[in-house]
Amino acid sequence: MQYAVLIRGIGPGNPNMKNEKLCAALESLGFTNVHAIISSGNLIFESKSRDSAKLESQIEKAFADKLGLTKNFVVIRSKDELEELIASNPFKGKEHGEKSYLLVTFFKDRNAVKGGFIASVIDTEDMRTPEFMSNLEKKYGKQITSRTWLTIGRIVKKFEKTQK
């Protein structure tokens, strides 16, 4: 199975949060076809496991043990789940641009909201992204991580490229 790992709270300035180290931690668990997508905590990999909760646990433990990342958690979604999300296009008619951001917030607890995610359009003229994220945390807690719609598209494209 192919999976995406969405890591919450990645700061590219931290040397232990560099893509090479994050990928190496996944490879140390025996995962294959490991790749990073931009420097914001997005990785893809392959595993024989079909238990995403167990995979999340293993990865969080590896990040803590190998990289000292104890405050970061991960959300895993399968390639199929992300392709279904793209196909459903929750942003029909909307465009990611200077005046509006299309944002998908994933919940660690898939049962917290229908589908395990919410799709939001941020009007950047009314609100900045950090303020919006703060409001999401107040409403839903910190067991969430968000990605732009463009990033979700990049992750799905990376899956496609690694299969050729």
Image (cartoon, helix red, strand yellow):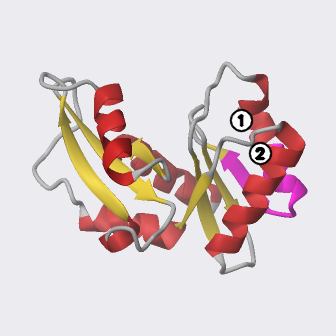
Does the image show residue 95?
Answer: yes
Quarter placement of the C terminus: bottom right
Q: Amino acid at mark 2?
A: Cys
Quadrant of res 146: top left
Does the image show residue 46?
Answer: no
Which one is in front, 13 or 31? 13
- Provide residue 98's location: percent of width, then percent of height: 21, 23
- Provide residue 95's location: percent of width, then percent of height: 17, 40
Which residue is located at x 61 percent, y 34 percent? 10
Query: What secondary structure is found at the residue carrying circle 2?
Result: helix
Magenta residues, start to end: 24-35
Which one is in front, 137 or 158? 137
As drawn, 53 above or below 14: below
Which one is in front, 106 or 136? 136
Give neighbour class at mark 1: few <14, some 14-19, many 20+ (Cα, 10 Å).
many
Which residue is located at x 78 percent, y 47 percent? 63
Quadrant of res 97: top left
Quadrant of res 49: bottom right
Q: Is residue 97 magenta?
A: no
Query: What secondary structure is found at the residue carrying circle 1?
Result: helix
For label 1, the residue is: 19
Which residue is located at x 80 percent, y 55 percent? 61
Q: Is residue 44 left or right of residue 123?
A: right
Q: Is residue 26 left or right of residue 89?
A: right
Q: Amino acid at mark 1?
A: Asn
- Provide residue 9's location: percent of width, then percent of height: 57, 36
Q: Are marks 1 and 2 in contact (CB under 8 Å)?
A: yes
For label 2, the residue is: 23
- Provide residue 19's location: percent of width, then percent of height: 71, 35
Q: How far is the residue under mark 1 from the one under mark 2?
A: 6 Å
